[in-house]
Amino acid sequence: GAVVSQHPSRVICKSGTSVKIECRSLDFQATTMFWYRQFPKKSLMLMATSNEGSKATYEQGVEKDKFLINHASLTLSTLTVTSAHPEDSSFYICSAEGTGGLETQYFGPGTRLLVL
Amino acid sequence: SQQGEEDPQALSIQEGENATMNCSYKTSINNLQWYRQNSGRGLVHLILIRSNEREKHSGRLRVTLDTSKKSSSLLITASRAADTASYFCATPAGGTSYGKLTFGQGTILTVHP
């Protein structure tokens, strides 16, 4: 079955640094990927839609300059948390949309970010 | 606005019992999905039910959809300790992309051995 990977799975960084999270579709091409954020014991909140070759579409309230998204190829989208602060600590999950009329997404395993 | 309000927020049962979780949503949908998430892990897709379906089964899972009431339920029969996880319903968030989802608040299920 389709597999989506995320790297790193866990990252700890100092406040003020930038962190890049990768989302890869391993055995299929994904023209569209999605980035979600999840706080502990909470639901997933859609942050943005990442489209290959074009600018990402951000949900209301998500700072595009804070969360930079790049979808440079059909198998890779990256989320960069710029100048991270403790309140950016969260679980970030990506998903990739398969082709061929599938009505499900394939989710990555998530990346836990802790900003000290 | 956030769709997919789920109840109960937490459910604690004994192994062998059935677990029922409910989800309500606000707007018209063409499908509804249920996902499972083990603590600190990614999501596992469980089942998708389309708007023209009323009930769907997959193994020990039974999902119902009532579009008139804008609600869905997930029933896990003969629960096992390994079913302990959070369960989320998800509906399409609109737009042309079928993969863009709005998630419910989730139900934390604990199955005691």
Image: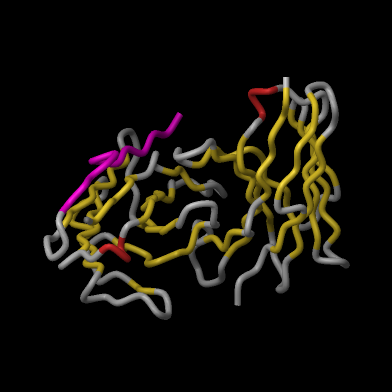
Left or right: A76, with A58 as reference point: left
Lateral position of residue B44 relative to residue A55, left or right: right
Which residue is at 75% across, 43% downward? B11
Compare residues B92 and A40 and report the one nearer the observer.
A40
Question: For this view, does B7 lie left or right of residue A49?
Answer: right
Q: Is residue A12 magenta?
A: yes
Q: Which residues are magenta?
A: A1-13
Q: Number of numbered discs present?
A: 0
How far across and how far down the image is residue B57, in percent?
79, 34
Placement of A46 over or under B112, stated as above or below: below
Asked if residue B101 is positioned above or below residue B36 in the image, the reply reads below
Picture quadrant of residue A65: bottom left
View extreme (front): residue: A116
Task: Pinpoint residue B95: horizontal percent, then vertical percent.
Answer: 52, 72
Q: Kindly identify the residue that appears in the image at 54 percent across and 36 percent down.
A: B38
Residue pictured at 24% horizontal, 41% vertical: A7
Quarter occupied by the N terminus of chain B: bottom right
Q: Residue furthest left?
A: A17
Q: Is residue A23 magenta?
A: no
- What quarter of the picture does the C terminus of chain B occupy? top right
Residue A26, image x, y percentages? 30, 35
The secondary structure that most of the magenta stretch takes on is strand
Q: Horizontally, is B97 left or right of A103 in the view?
A: left
Colour theme:
secondary structure
Asked which quadrant contains residue A61, the reply is bottom left
Residue drawn at x 29%, y 69% as measured from the top left: A56
Q: Position of residue B27 (x, y in %)?
A: 71, 73
Considering depth in this image, is A39 or A55 the residue closer to the camera?
Answer: A39
